[in-house]
Amino acid sequence: MKNKRVGGRRNQQSHLHLGEEAGLDIWQRLTRVLLGILLVGVVVFVLSQFVPEVDKQKTVDAELAALTARREALVRERDLRKASLERLRTDQEYFEVFARDKLDLRREGETIYRIERPDGGALRAIEVTE
């Protein structure tokens, strides 16, 4: 009978051991699932923090491109004005054309006629009377 008892205990211990393994296996699976969910949550949180920053970066890049284009246009305008100023200082003919066109000046004996366009612009005609 001792063998039966020992054998019976072995069977009960085997059952208990299998039950404990099954319990541990369930907890291990739940832990893995929980870690997976936690990892997905962290990834979603990190992405939610960076998406607005990427949008801000795109906006700043667009502003930078617009300002760079504006700066280049202003540099070209400055260079043209410098060249015009230099020509005004050195080129007498250019100076006379500028004075007639922009300042409405004339030489002695010249008569200036202004012809208005229908669109509001003006044409200038110079009549030379000697």
Image: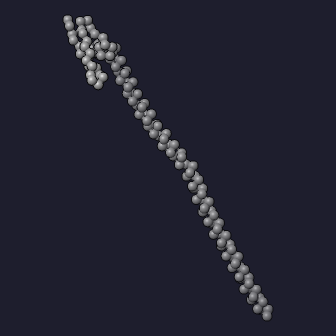
Q: Nearer the viewer, residue 105 or 97?
A: 105
Based on the displayed image, in which of its 4 quarters is residue 90 positioned? top left
Q: Is residue 95 visible?
A: no
Q: Nearer the viewer, residue 106 or 70?
A: 106
Q: Is residue 89 visible?
A: yes
Q: Is residue 113 left or right of residue 18?
A: left
Residue drawn at x 29%, y 14% as measured from the top left: 100
Residue drawn at x 41%, y 34% as measured from the top left: 69
Based on the displayed image, in which of its 4 quarters is residue 12 positioned? bottom right
State the image coordinates of residue 50 (x, y, percent, origin top left): 55, 48
Residue drawn at x 53%, y 49% as measured from the top left: 51
State the image coordinates of residue 80 (x, y, percent, origin top left): 35, 23
- Seen in the picture, residue 88 relative to 47 is either above or below; the reply is above
Q: Nearer the viewer, residue 120 or 109?
A: 120
Residue at the far front in the pictured view: 118
Based on the displayed image, in which of its 4 quarters is residue 105 positioned? top left
State the image coordinates of residue 26 (x, y, percent, origin top left): 65, 72
Quarter of the figure that contains the C terminus: top left
- Seen in the picture, residue 95 relative to 120 is either above or below; the reply is above
Q: Is residue 52 left or right of residue 110?
A: right
- Seen in the picture, residue 7 relative to 90 is either above or below; the reply is below
Q: Is residue 100 left or right of residue 45?
A: left
Quarter of the figure that contains the N terminus: bottom right
